[in-house]
Amino acid sequence: MVIEWVLLGAGIAILVGIFMLLSRVYLGPTVFDRILATNAMGTKTVIFLALLGFISKRPEFLDTALAYAIINFVSTIAILKFVEFKKIG
């Protein structure tokens, strides 16, 4: 019974962190701060999906979380490359 409250508290803490990062995306002074905050939001989303899968005892969420992590990583690298060099190729 105690573990459910701990997991619920962890989920709420992750969601609060995501909303704090959302303010950094909106108010970031540079484009690199915004990209970093967006990447951190993606990472927190992956952790939240894994936690949600653990709470609901459905391991399929872990597959979704891993796929989202790969997409998050590749898109962050592509966006950083585009911002720095103004082209993808």
Image: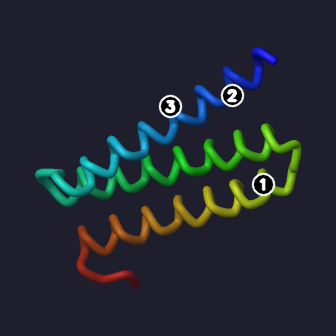
Q: For the residue carrying disc 1, how many other residues have a C-alpha within 10 Å: few (<14), some (14-19), or many (20+)?
A: some
Between 89 and 72, the one nearer to me in the picture: 72
**Label 1 belongs to which residue?**
61
Between 77 and 58, the one nearer to me in the picture: 58
Q: Relative to residue 18, is residue 73 depicted above or below?
A: below
The mark lying in front, picked from 1 and 2, is: 2
- Residue at horizontal 65 percent and vertical 30 percent from the top: 8
- Residue at horizontal 59 percent and vertical 28 percent from the top: 10
**Label 2 belongs to which residue?**
7
Q: Does label 1 or label 3 sit earlier along the sequence?
A: 3
**Badge 3 amino acid:** Ala
Q: Residue 32 is drawn in which quadrant?
A: bottom left
**Badge 1 amino acid:** Phe
Whether pointer 1 and pointer 2 mark residues with C-beta atoms closer than 8 Å, the reply is no
Q: Secondary structure at mark 1?
A: helix
Estimate the x, y position of residue 6 in percent, counting from the top left. 67, 21
Cα–Cα span, label 1 and label 3: 19 Å
Cα–Cα span, label 3 and label 2: 10 Å
Q: Secondary structure at mark 3?
A: helix
Q: Secondary structure at mark 2?
A: helix
- Residue at horizontal 21 percent and vertical 57 percent from the top: 26
